[in-house]
Image (cartoon, coloured by chain):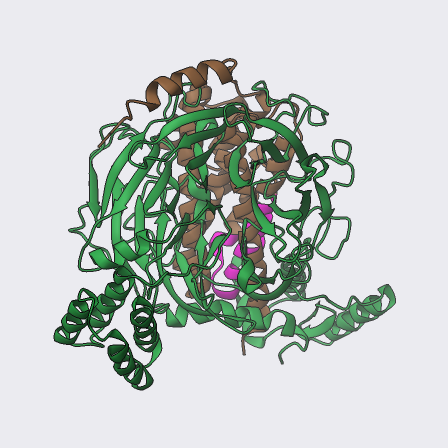
Chain colours: A brown, B green
Amino acid sequence: MRLPSPVAVPLAVVAALLLVAAPAAAQRPTDADLRFVRDMIPHHQQALDMTALVRARTESRALRLLAERIETAQRDEIAWMRAWLADHDPEAAGAHDAHASHGSGHEMSGHEMHGAAHGSHGSGHAMDHADMDHAMMPGMLTPREMARLAAASGSLFEGLFLEGMIRHHEGAVGMVRDLFASPGAAQLPDLFRFASDVEADQAAEIARMRLLLADLFFSRP
Amino acid sequence: MLPVRLSSVRPIRAVLLLPVLLAGLTVSAQTTDPRVGLRAGLTDAGSAAFGLELVANIPRPAGFTNPDDAGDFGFANTDLAFQGDRLFMGNYHGVLIYDISTPAQPALLSTIACPGGQGDVSVHGNLLFMSVEETRGRVDCGTGGVESPVSEERFRGVRIFDISNIQQPRQVASVQTCRGSHTHTLVPDLADPSNLYVYVSGTSGIRPGEELAGCAPGGPEDAGSSLFRIEVIRVPLANPERAEVIGTPRLLAGLDPAPRRQPTPETRAAMEAQVAEMRAGGRFAVVYDGEIVDVPSGMVEQVLGQIVAQRGGSGAPTAADTTTAHALFDQFVQQSSEGPSTGPDQCHDITVYPEIGLAGGACAGYGLLLDIRDPANPRRVAAAGDENFAYWHSATFSNDGRSVVFTDEWGGGGAPRCRATDRPEWGANAIFTIDGQDLDFQSYYKMPAAQSTEENCVAHNGSLVPVPGRDVMAQAWYQGGLSVFDFTDPSNPVEIAYFDRGPVSADGLTMGGYWSTYWYNGYVYGSEIARGLDVFRLVPTDHLTAAEIDAAEGVAGGTVNPQHQTRVTWTASADVARAYLDQLVRADAMEETRAQQIRAAIATPSADLAGMAGGLEQDAARADGRDASRLRDLAATLRALR
């Protein structure tokens, strides 16, 4: 239902003309903005690779809930980042989509490679891409570490998962701080908000995970 | 063996776990809910309403919207403030000011173009306050952003406008802060009306010290850190241009872990030597929190077994396996105990209730109770954790100050967190009772209708609806719509009215929905991020009667600001008496026939209301809880009517 006030419309127009000097120039993302989003997608993807391991490897309710929460957040954020890239950098967005759909990235090159090394194709294959470590984002687990995590269960898995995810999240927080330190970056309101949310949410999850890790050691008989 | 000094961590864990045990499912999936499956559209979305009637929708004016992208966050509507006949709506691009003298026909009075987000607003006398947090914010309100990471042109903090000429608001002060202002709260000094205080909550990155002197990162106990604190601005009302930061209370210091006794380097070295010796003797020990702690044997067994298996071996672990295990345990301990702090470094909202001397701090990882009797020096008196809360976002006290609704903005507000697959206790409200200096968890409340993936949805801002005898809140859930719920029984919140539209767009998530929905003088106003200003009236249902609505509509307030509560009192009236009667009947605390007699008596000038009041007071003595207070309040109302 829409009930525009007969008075409001003309006033609104007048006010807008008087007080709004010019519509905001359509701001464009900087290279740092684009790099941040492009890099954060594979970074988030690895978190999903990690959480996918949880259910089969631990009965810990706390850890399963944590994984569910991380999974929900990272999946939603990947969707947001893909949509954002599609708006601002269709070429790169297309590359990510292609990667997501067929999983194997051997034909890719350049910056797309890190996506290939840590794609949605399950961590079991991660060892195959050990040579791509150089393309990893801050805090990401190496393929060898991912393999080790996948082979673990129980206490060892819980410890490795928490230790790895804390490091992973710290990497993301660092990426946000690097973004804000880059000239001209994060001037787009949606990206400012997204990056700030990533920082706040992941910092909160780091705190949660530190408590869990302490519990893992010290609260068991 | 359990470690000795985990007392700093343990109480918090205990609090964290409690809600899980108590988590009754107050909300269940309702497949028949008319809010499910509404048609998408910016201006023609399907809608569903219960107990609410939309009486006006005023789209955002030109200049405050991107015609090509309704979800452009640079033009999102944000928080609301009210003064007399005026409504102030924040926007990422500035402020919109409406005349609401005819609430069903709001009229745009003027606008302030001044981008920088979030643009949250408050009003006091002739002063309008606005939060600016983004790095694109400019001192001159320009739209071009600020290129350099260090610049004198950047503004992040609280702007103050003089609005004595509403057509031409004039910026009279701008107070820069280290993390900008995500939100702010006006705090009067009840003992000194010449000064006003502003609590500033910054949640984004810290500015470089080169841009604003004194800004720096640092730990919770580091007095120079811009984290773990809020800023307090004092505004001399006679000279608002002299507004300045007068304090930076470190409300989040010492929260978690509690201050640790750090061993000296010598002690530390001695401990490590002792651990090495224990390990040489075949034990598994680590240094944790200044103590030597044995690793639980079950964990040692499991970890060793898997190390052996991972190298493809079998049988007893070798010396190398044992070394690997020691290294892993050290690594885990390091990750669990290092870092700047495990407590939050920010508050999102601080809701003050000056008449009870308390504020509710919604501070990322915790809900805090603050003593604000000295408004320049707020002091933390209680902290609650909650395992299901991702991000403590806002707080709303019941009118009697006995309970408080905290919200969890899980995902930051841009994510769809009300899908059927999202847990009802995540991204919800948690309702606590206040027992002296303790916060006791009672229940969760989440808007119950499943939303689509195209709708950003999570608990957000709301305010009390002043129904006498009940605790009722009208709350924004972004694209989950407006949900009005009753938390009179804090352990059993119940939805009593709602309004919801379909997604802004069927083609992917487009930001929209209610940022805030607040009651003001008989109407609920909603700032819809993408669709503009909405105005609602409550309509009677079984859950809320005409008398209860009339009684709420009889409450008049001059100024309403976000995160600021004043005590509601009800002038004795027939509406108020009838509201209590309806509630007593609904709660089975009074027979309908008796309620009818009293209603008839109220309408009869010669009736003996004082006599009836006496009877009600006797009943009150035998009743308990809210029914007893309703009977007493009804009796007092009847006496006052004569």
Give the magenta-colored segment's residue range: A149-170
Viewer-side residue, B548 vs B389: B548
Q: Is residue A167 magenta?
A: yes
What is the quadrant of the N terminus of chain B in the image?
A: bottom right
* Image x and y of residue B577, in percent: 27, 66
Asked whether residue B416 is drawn in magenta, I would say: no
Which residue lies at the image location 39% right of the left edge and 20% below the top edge? Answer: A12
Q: Quadrant of the C terminus of chain B?
A: bottom left
Q: Is residue A122 left or right of residue B628?
A: right
**Which residue does the image show at 65% across and 25% down from the upper left?**
B139
Figure check: B298 above or below A41 = below
Q: Position of residue A200 (x, y in %)?
A: 55, 46
Rendering coords of residue B209 (x, y %): 76, 36
Placement of B325 over or under B592, stated as above or below: above
The quadrant in which residue B636 appears is bottom left
Of residues A15 and B233, the one drawn nearer to the viewer in this rendering: A15
Observer able to see residue B389: no
- Check the image and name the residue furthest to the right: B266
Residue furthest left as drawn: B593
Left or right, A18 with reference to B497: right
* As drawn, B575 above or below B413: below
Tell me which secondary structure the magenta stretch mostly adopts. Answer: helix
